[in-house]
Amino acid sequence: SESVAQKLADLAYREPDVHVRSQLAASARRLPAAQALPIIKNLAQRSEDTDDIHIPLLLWWAIESKADADRDAVLELFEDKAFWDQPLVAKHLTERLMRRYAATGKHKDLLTAARLLELAPSKEHATRLMAGLEAAYEGRTIANLPVELAAAMAKAGATSPTVRLRQGDQAAVAQALTIIADDKADAAKRQQLVAVFGTINQ
């Protein structure tokens, strides 16, 4: 019932026992979005669970289960700027959510990725999202992005050189080749760029 769902959401915010919080996160996955997301939001504010071995993943699985059918409700969580700065959200959820939407390549999901970037309160938050997008496209070219996503990336100022390289941006290609040829440049960065060239049509 709605009254019980409200009590569970309140409990998520104040429950001192980590095992009970863990069960609340697991149960949220099986509840309808309207009942689950308030529980998820309150659990995500429990910074003491940021490094717990179970709760962050349980919360992610709960959100992921709503990411398709209830995407608007999931996005509503991120309309609250304070939600982005919760340690558990910043460390475990934002990057995963962007990766989830970007990985499918579906137009609807890429538009949702664009909306996430639009909602990002700062460049730092947008950079975290872009890490998720890069992970989603690892090993393949980023092509034919919706204009809305490209515009959101540009507006956020979070387009990384690696993403631009995957998009075939000629300036990024030239810059990457310069770095690769520089034996004084960071070796890990050079290796990363070589790996990207191995997966794109250049």
Image: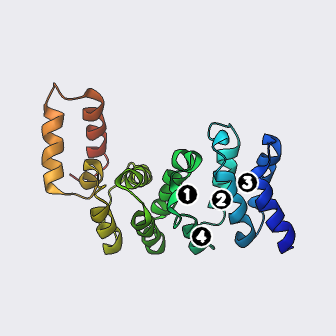
For numbered disc 1, what is the local secondary structure? helix
Q: Does residue 25 appear anywhere in the picture?
A: no
Distance in Å between CA atoms under marks 2 and 1: 8 Å
Q: Residue at x 53, y 57 (%)?
A: 82
**Does the residue at mark 2 contact the one at mark 1 (Cβ under 8 Å)?**
yes
Badge 4, how many Cα within 10 Å: few under 14, some, many 20+?
some
Badge 3, how many Cα within 10 Å: few under 14, some, many 20+?
some
Q: Position of residue 22 (x, y in %)?
A: 77, 46
Front disc: 4 or 2: 2
Earlier in the chain: of badge 4 and badge 2, it is 2
Q: Which residue is mark 2?
A: 41
For numbered disc 4, what is the local secondary structure? loop
Badge 1, how many Cα within 10 Å: few under 14, some, many 20+?
some
**Does the residue at mark 4 contact the one at mark 2 (Cβ under 8 Å)?**
no
Earlier in the chain: of badge 3 and badge 4, it is 3
Distance in Å between CA atoms under marks 2 and 3: 9 Å
Distance in Å between CA atoms under marks 3 and 4: 26 Å
Earlier in the chain: of badge 1 and badge 4, it is 4
Quarter of the image where one finds residue 196: top left
Q: Position of residue 49 (x, y in %)?
A: 67, 41
Q: Which residue is mark 1?
A: 83
Q: Which residue is mark 4?
A: 68
Earlier in the chain: of badge 1 and badge 3, it is 3
Q: Residue at x 78, y 48 (%)?
A: 21
Q: Which residue is mark 3?
A: 13
